[in-house]
Amino acid sequence: MDTETERPSFEVEPKGSVIRLAGRLRMPDAPALWKEVRAATDEAKKGSLTIDLSDATAIDGGVMSLLVALRTDLHARGVKAEIEGTPEQFLPLVELYEAKKPPQKRKTRKPEGLVENVGRATSEVGSELSQVISFFGEMVIAAVGLVRHPRSGHWKEIPPLVNKAGADALPIVVLINFLVGFVMAYQSAKQLKQFGANVYVADLVGLSVTRELAPLMTAIIVCGRSGAAFAAEIGSMKVSEEVDALRTLGLRPFSWLVLPRVLALMIVTPLLTVIGDIIGVLGGLFVAVTSLDITPRGYLIETQKAMELWDVQHGVCKSFAFALAIGLIACQQGFAASGGAEGVGRRTTSTVVASLFALVVLDALFTVVFRFFGL
């Protein structure tokens, strides 16, 4: 075993009011160095203390910033701490970190009042609204340009995106929709038995799943998987300046990034919804056969009697709108990302929240409109 790599390259020697730091004070050893220095100064409450660097053979900016922070902390406790004996070759580093200047008191942030909170929130909403309007403006321009010059689109990107958003999501869509049909049938089984209306479980499950539950549940899954992934991908490209690089190359980011993703979701989501319809009905069939003594043939015949083709089309129409909303929100949030990984994560979370809100609003609008037209 190589013992040299395990041995600390520094020494911390407390002597009265002096703490001598010797050896190589480098960032890889900073955690161990900080632990020893803190242990040596924990008892210091008043008086003076000198951090002696005269025997240091190497020191970097990371360790120097820790020593400055230690000195500030000691001053806050009433201990007058100074960094002394710094070898001449490290003096520029001391000046850079202002280790010789008196420690500055840490500024306490004044709590914001009600008016400031309202003002800041209003400013943030205004900024967000401005970004959304700008996004849709650029998207319309890109769409018009794409119609005039179809070859400028990044069409080759669509099949992989369809596979990624569709095939990969299929297992969870199947499972969730089966459980939705299963739970609906199971919850209604007891009441239907009391009235001798066992067979009507097929009507209940079939209409509920195709008109409402399968489109909504499928869209929620697509939002959580593909929407969040799209926002994270585009957000990462934005913060790493890859989007700016596309613009530099004369390519429209909206044609290359937004439209393929939106179109892929508008292809995949209706297909997943139809599969969810079938699987949801099968979930109800399972309960009907095992708990309500209905034969599979009888269940399917009753489902056929209760449903019309429009019931399925009703859900598919919704799924197109859901997919469009998820795709646009995800891409807009991705383009609005800033501030590195933290900003990308924040925009990814916002994508899911905003998409779920949009799904509920759209679902309510569809319900009102379809009811108004008697559909």
Image: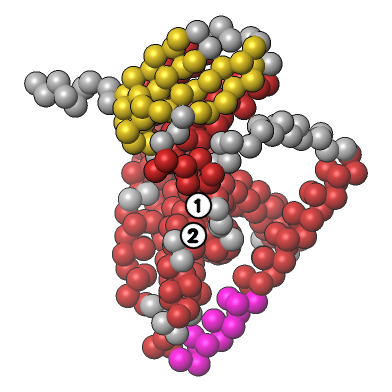
**Toward which corner of the image does residue 321 lie, by quadrant?**
bottom right
Regarding residue 89, the answer to whether it shows in the image is yes
Regarding residue 274, the answer to whether it shows in the image is no
Judging by the rendered image, the residue that carries numbered circle 2 is 239
Q: Amino acid at mark 1?
A: Gly
Q: Residue furthest right?
A: 115
What is the crowding at mark 2: few (fewer than 14 residues within 10 Å), some, or many (at least 20)?
many
Q: Amino acid at mark 2?
A: Val
Q: CA distance from mark 1 to mark 2?
A: 6 Å
The quadrant of the rendering that contains the C terminus is bottom right
Judging by the rendered image, the residue that carries numbered circle 1 is 340
Circles 1 and 2 in contact, beta carbons < 8 Å:
yes
Name the one closer to the observer, 206 or 338. Answer: 338
Residue 101 forms part of the magenta stretch:
no
In the image, 370: left or right of 278?
right
Residue under the point 52% across and 88% down: 145
**Toward which corner of the image does residue 374 lie, by quadrant?**
bottom right
How far across and down, in percent of the image, does residue 268 sit? Answer: 41, 61
How far across and down, in percent of the image, does residue 259 sit? Answer: 48, 72
What is the crowding at mark 1: few (fewer than 14 residues within 10 Å), some, or many (at least 20)?
few
Residue under the point 49% across and 63% down: 238
Name the one closer to the observer, 363 or 285. Answer: 363
How far across and down, in percent of the image, does residue 368 sit? Answer: 74, 56
Residues shaded magenta: 137-149
Residue under the point 37% across and 77% down: 155
As drawn, 305 above or below 250? above
**Element carrying mark 1:** helix
Q: Earlier in the sequence, mark 1 or mark 2?
A: 2
